[in-house]
Image (spheres, rainbow, N blue to C red):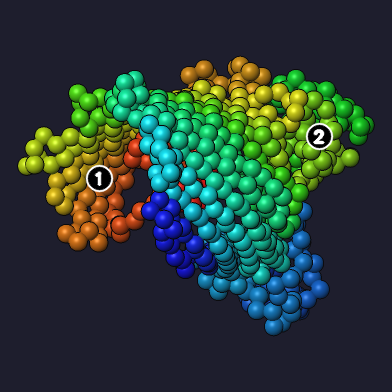
Amino acid sequence: MLGFDGRLTDNLTYEVSYVYGQTRTRFLSTNYRLRDRYFAALDAVDEGAFNTGTPNGNIVCRSSLDPDAPFNDPNGIIIGADTTPITFTPGANSGCVPLNIFGNGAPSQAALDWINVDLENRVKVQQHVVSASVSGDTGAVFELPGGPVGFAFGAEYRKEKSNFVPDPFLVQDALSDLAPQFPESGSFDVKEVFAEINIPVLRDMPFADILQFGAAIRLSDYSTIGSTTTWKVDGTWGPVRDIRFRGTYSEAVRAPNLTELFAPQNGAFSFIDDPCDPSNLAEGTSFRVANCNAILAGFGIDPATFNPANDPQATASLPGRTIGTPFLDEETAKTWTAGVVLRPSFIPGLVATVDWYDIKIRNAITTATAQDLTDACVDQPTLDNQFCDLVTRDPTTGFVSDYLLRPLNVSQFATSGADFTINYAFSPSDSLGRFNLRLAGGYLDTLTFIPTPGAEVDNDRTEAFAPKWNGTLDITWVKDNWSLNYGVNYFSKTRRFTTEQIEANPDLVDPNYIFYREKWEHDVQLGFKTDDERFQFYAEREQHLRARPRRRRAQLSVELPRALCLCGGEGESGEPGAVRKPLPDWGGVFRPCARPMDPTRCG
């Protein structure tokens, strides 16, 4: 990192910097089975019986005696897998060790060493960032009743590169339990300019302890998707010191990442419960029946006799493919928030906040699972949609025979709800130390997904990882070098089955088991820090509860000091971030901030 800053005037400062970062990661996975060696080692014979017809008790691999012996999977364990030798050459010098999977002491270590390998994958990520900014206020020229107008503007250039090198055995498609993977590399650069302003209209006046407005904008030019614009306006009004009202309205974008854009075609395995099976027809949208009938009729198959659920070929793990999408567009989020902050002067140390958020994302980038992809194909208003283009069916059986998983710009995600916090810090006396009580929670009002324009709305609230209520409570005591914390995490009940499944089959399960019960997680932590604060030691105990205790854990950890600034959370002032909630398939929206004077961008 290189940089310098300085003061242009008493009210104007500048900053210029260059940052280079590189991350190298090595992933080691042990004991993965080589497909060709596994079946060669299983195919063992008595050497004497094979050569002369008289057994001599010497068990060897048949391929060592007959290099032309057929290599296949006679029992259909790996459907569609090619077991032709690719990691060894059959013959007397192949090194093949017979694999005995029965009896005490079996299999031998020598056999395991021959059929199993360790995989080593490597990733390298690089980033270059050049930035320059000027910040200041109008104090030397004019001031408003609330103070001088603050501002900042600047420019930034950023280039990112990534390179993934998989293990050669993965590239060879040599493994029994893993699909092939191929090298992946890509890069992009972006040029940006940004500006922001803070306008303090009134301060310390009757009915206006504070009244201020702000705005920010960022113009970006990506080498991959072209030009984008991000902007935000906000305002804060506090009629008295004890209460403040706040609100924001913003439009943010997320450009597709390198993997979403440039991933090569790799293999995949998935189980697919065919949505056109008669038992699944009612679980889809109102379009599913007609679309399934049209597909099957096109193959000359009678929908009434179509029954993939009872066919081993259709219910086995199905090989498919994954790939990036170089023609992706950015996803755009429009967000508004409105909230209130309470700091009652008659209760020192108490701060309470409530914020309502409403977020709509269009052209959201998501990669469907094989199951969701197959369902989405027949749940759209017509079969002429981007999901059906990625699913292939066997013209003879009608079963799904291939699929291609790739990121797509779907139509819309939408969510709304409320976040609230209550924080109370107090110290009864110096001898008793300091106490802090913090309650943080959320209410999820809506969470919907529309896969394509005109499709039916998918309501995901109360489904997996989307409880109606969630919250955490922390009670902390600190005195000198010691600390003690008791924490509780909670989320309300969530569905075992989707709303579509229950609507289609109300008798699918006993009503008492439609939902998972609410979850409680209790944590007690005792901490000690050294006088120089270089080290912190923790002893911790956790307990996870639903109807009864399920898991307990105790641990001891050592932690070095660290600091992290997060966009989308709340700072010490309780001000809301630009984006309030992580959404499905967004990969999370809380990232390190670029700089305090640059609130429009999460890096």
Q: In this view, does 36 lie to the left or right of 423?
A: right
User: Spatial distance from mark 2 to mark 1, Cα to Cα?
Assistant: 53 Å
Rendered residue at 68%/29% (across/down) = 450
Mark 2 element type: loop
Seen from the viewer's position, the closer of residues 361 and 118 is 361
Kind of residue sitting beneath label 1 = Gln
All told, the count of numbered labels is 2
How far from the left and from the top, in percent, is residue 56?
Answer: 66, 78
Question: Which residue is at the far left?
Answer: 431
Residue 188 position in % (x across, y down): 66, 59
Disc on the earlier residue, 2 or 1: 2
Tell me the amino acid under the disc marked 2.
Asn
Most foreground residue, 245 or 43: 245
Say above or below: 481 vs 245: below
Left or right relative to 590: residue 121 = right
Q: Which residue occupies the foreground of this view, 351 or 465?
A: 351
- Name the residue at 50% across, 55% down: 133
- The picture quadrant where one finds residue 486 is top left
The image's mark for residue 385 is 2
Residue 500 lies, in percent from the top left, at 64, 23
Left/right of residue 603 with respect to residue 7 in the rendered view: right
Q: Which of 10 and 2 is in front in this view?
A: 10
| Residue 135 higher or lower than 235, as above or below | below
Quadrant of the image occupied by residue 141: top left
Residue that numbered label 1 is attached to: 525
Residue 470 visible in the shown view: no
Mark sitting on residue 576: none
Place of residue 262 in the rendered image (x, y in percent of width and height, measured from the top left): 70, 56
Q: Assign a secondary structure to mark 1.
A: strand
Check whether the beta carbons of the residues at disc 2 and disc 1 lie within 8 A of each other. no
Residue at image point 52% right, 58% down: 132
Query: From the viewer's perspective, is residue 5 above or below residue 250?
Result: below
